Image (cartoon, grey):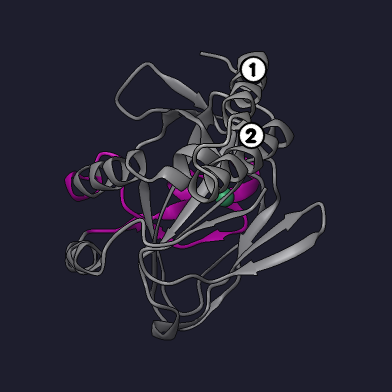
Amino acid sequence: MLNEIRNILSEAQVEDFRRELETADWSDGRGSAGYLSQAVKRNAQLPDTHPSGLRLGETIVMALEQNARFVSAALPQKILPPLFNRYASGQEYGAHIDGAVRPIAGTAHRIRTDLSATLFLSAPDEYEGGELIIEDLFGSRSVKLGAGDMMLYPGSSVHRVSPVTRGVRYAAFFWVQSMVRGDVERRILFDLDNAIQALARDVPNHAELVRLAGVYHNLLRRWVEV
Ligand code: NI
């Protein structure tokens, strides 16, 4: 399931992030790429222990935890502290697949990358190219969102960032280990949750709502790992 979640960050937060990122010391993005990805990765990245990255990453995680659409779609168990990248003109990240397991920097913990997320920090008119292109079951989808908006997609998808041909593209990216491992099961739960919420708004006193909420939780109980 590809899920677009708007306004994870406010305009003021994006401005704050950008002030900090534009003056930060960036490193070569290949430092954190696996063997195959290194050959196709051309960007800059903040080191995962960079104080600005840690601070901004915490702000993102707090915003995510309060975002009902994210929680419903991802059913997060663990969120990897967000990382930050920067693509200047001529840079790109060719087709690759994210590693299935990522260490959490500075700890002995690891997460399974059920979901990948890209949070755009540059407005679409600030750069040309730089689309996130995700291949899914129905073909490939080209994504370029507003600053503060986020794309959530299965960690299993092949994806790339097309070359930036003008301007600079800043983004945060991270992975989520979900309480529900399978994308198909997560999608069913997300659809059901949304339908129940819409019915609860439109026919709030309908007796069958309790039964539907029960179906949601009984499915979740079958599939959840906690
Ligand atoms: Ni990737």
Q: Quadrant of residue 43?
A: bottom left
Q: Residues within 10 Å of mark 2 (few under 14, many from 20)?
A: many
Residue 82 in percent (x, y) is at: 36, 44
Identity, as a three-letter code, of the amino acid under mark 1:
Asn
What residue is at 42 percent from the left and 72 percent from the top?
A: 146
Residue 68 in percent (x, y) is at: 42, 43
Q: Residue furthest right?
A: 138
Residue 31 in percent (x, y) is at: 44, 46
Residue 36 in percent (x, y) is at: 65, 45
Disc ID at residue 185: none
Check residue 174 for magenta coloring.
no
Q: Secondary structure at mark 2?
A: helix
The answer as to whether callout 1 falls within 8 Å of ligand 1 is: no
Query: What whole-number distance in Å separates the C-alpha atoms at marks 1 and 2?
Result: 10 Å
Identity, as a three-letter code, of the amino acid under mark 2:
Leu
Q: Is residue 91 left or right of residue 140?
A: left
Which residue, given by chain and number where applicable, does mark 1 sit on?
218
